[in-house]
């Protein structure tokens, strides 16, 4: 039997009691005992099916709830893993930026040191070259003066 039949049986029992003869000066009703017992037997037969359906619905509801909880937990775990991965990637990017900044600073310091060394070398080399050129210039001037003096003496002596 289904839920509708069970309700119909209960309605018939209720009608039987409502339509029965009343005992005067009491709330008691006179009902056909056999008919009432037959309705109760049919109700008892119908109840197990109704109970089974209710139990099945309850179990199905619990299964759906468990499935929903499991799915929610899986999604939460995925979201947590994704967030952790993003944080990890962020930390990697942050560490890489710091490392690249450090490397750039060291490279700039080395470049500045090389530039300073190169400038000092050029200054020293040019200083030495300038001294040599001045000495060579002085020697050339001295040699030219000797040549002029020698020519002058040659002209006077000739």
Image (tube, rainbow, N blue to C red):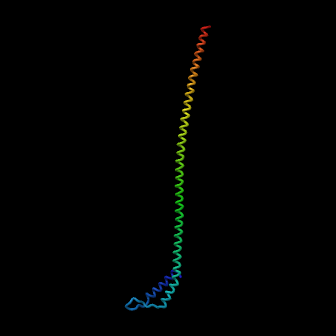
> Is residue 12 shown above or below 123?
below
Q: Nearer the viewer, residue 123 or 4?
A: 123
The residue at 54%/37% (across/down) is: 113
Quarter of the image where one finds residue 85 = bottom right
Q: Going by the image, does 75 lie left or right of 22?
A: right
Provide residue 26's location: percent of width, then percent of height: 38, 90
Provide residue 147's location: percent of width, then percent of height: 60, 15
Q: Residue furthest left?
A: 25
Provide residue 157's location: percent of width, then percent of height: 61, 8
Q: Residue furthest top?
A: 158
The residue at 43%/90% (across/down) is: 20
> Is residue 118 shown above or below 10?
above
Quarter of the image where one finds residue 30 = bottom left
Provide residue 137's location: percent of width, then percent of height: 57, 21
Q: Tell me the quarter of the image containing the C terminus.
A: top right
Q: How many marks?
A: 0
The residue at 49%/84% (across/down) is: 9
Q: Residue furthest right?
A: 158
> Is residue 98 shown above or below 119?
below
The residue at 53%/71% (across/down) is: 63
Q: Nearer the viewer, residue 154 or 10?
A: 154
């Amino acid at each position: 039997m289904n839920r509708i039949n069970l309700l119909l049986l209960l309605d018939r029992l209720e009608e039987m009691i409502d339509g029965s003869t009343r005992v005067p000066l009491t709330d008691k009703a006179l009902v056909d005992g056999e008919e009432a017992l037959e309705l109760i037997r049919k109700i008892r037969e119908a109840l197990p099916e109704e109970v089974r359906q209710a139990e099945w619905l309850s179990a199905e509801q619990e299964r759906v709830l468990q499935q929903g909880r499991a799915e929610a937990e899986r999604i939460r775990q995925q979201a947590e893993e994704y967030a952790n991965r993003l944080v990890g990637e962020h930390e990697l990017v942050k560490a890489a930026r710091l490392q690249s900044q450090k490397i750039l600073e060291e490279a700039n310091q080395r470049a500045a040191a090389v530039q300073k060394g190169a400038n000092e070398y050029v200054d020293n080399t040019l200083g030495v070259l300038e001294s040599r050129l001045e000495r060579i210039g002085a020697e050339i001037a001295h040699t030219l003066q000797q040549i002029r003096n020698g020519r002058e003496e040659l002209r006077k002596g000739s």
